[in-house]
Image (spheres, helix red, strand yellow):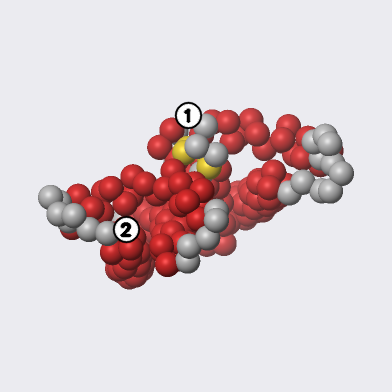
Amino acid sequence: MDDTYYNRGLISFSGAPQWLMGIASFLAALISLYSLLIWVRIILTWIRLPGQSSENPLTHYLSKIVDPYLNWFKGISAFRRSHIDLTPLIALAVLSVVQSILRLFGSYGKITVGMVFALILSTLWSFLLSPILWFVMALLGVRLYFCYKRGPNTIAYIKMIDSLVGGVLNWVQRLFYKGKTINDRQLVLTSLIFFAIVYVSSSALIRVLVSVFAKLSF
């Protein structure tokens, strides 16, 4: 008889063999290493050494290892805007969930569906929602600075930032000031405060939901 059983939704392996748990831990370690290579690949794309006229050799070899996986997520257009590509965050989030599941099984030989949901929710917050909200708030903060600090290149900077958060500003205006005329500073300040509140409340909600899911017996 198969040792696998389902008890109140608990996905477990009665007396899970140590070798199976060892394989899970080993795969979790490999995924951790692969995730690190992805981060190195991302960072190297931002860095160009003085006098460097061609692609960094390390970047070239890393691209052969990690790009085939990253390319699976390139089609998610919602996370690609202008010169910004956030799809690697999705790729890393998927790896993080799988790694956490393998690590849990490798340590305890069992895992609940509730734990899986808790891991997915926590990972989505850590790798996607939280970074995106911080990014938007940082851009809005810089945008607000340029509303007060005028200079010869201010208009160019504002246009560049608006190309990234213009949709956000328009959405906030429709949400709070529909049919009203407001100045630029008020709109940016309102948007910044709104997203700060969204971040704090979302963070608290995620913590509660993760705790609830982790305690479920199924």
Quadrant (top left/top right/bottom left/bottom right) for the N terminus: top left
Q: Is residue 117 visible?
A: yes
In this view, the residue in front, 136 or 153, is: 153
User: Residue drawn 52% across and 32% down?
Assistant: 74
Which is more toward the observer, 135 or 200?
135
Where is the C terminus found, in terms of image quarters?
Answer: bottom left
The numbered dot on residue 192 is none
Question: Answer yes or no: do the residues labelled 1 and 2 have beta carbons within 8 Å?
Answer: no
* Label 1 vs 2, first from the N-terminus: 1
> What amino acid is found at the position of numbered circle 2 in the picture?
Asp
Q: Answer left or right for 58 relative to 68.
A: right
As drawn, is 138 to the left or to the right of 9? right
The residue that label 1 is drawn on is 75
In the image, residue 15 lies at what x, y percent?
51, 56
The amino acid at mark 1 is Gly
Return the residue nearer the eye: 46 or 180: 180
Mark 1 neighbour class, 10 Å CA radius: few under 14, some 14 to 19, many 20 or more: few
Give whichever of 183, 128 is nearer the camera: 183
Q: Residue at x 18, y 55 (%)?
A: 181
Determine the residue located farthest toward the right in the rendered image.
51
Residue 122 seen by the camera:
no
Residue found 41% across the figure and 62% down from its top: 147
Instruction: Specify whether 147 is left or right of 169.
Output: right
Q: What is the x, y in percent for residue 56?
A: 81, 40
Numbered tag placed on residue 184 in the rendering: 2
Q: Check the image and report above or below for 173 versus 142.
A: above
Instruction: Decide: few, some or many residues near mark 2? Use Cα within 10 Å; few <14, some 14-19, many ≥20.
Output: few
Q: Secondary structure at mark 2?
A: helix
Instruction: Provide residue 160's location: percent of width, then percent of height.
Output: 49, 46
**Residue 152 lies in what quarter of the image?**
bottom right
Identify the element where label 1 is drawn.
Answer: loop
Which residue in the rendered view is the most extreme toward the left? 179
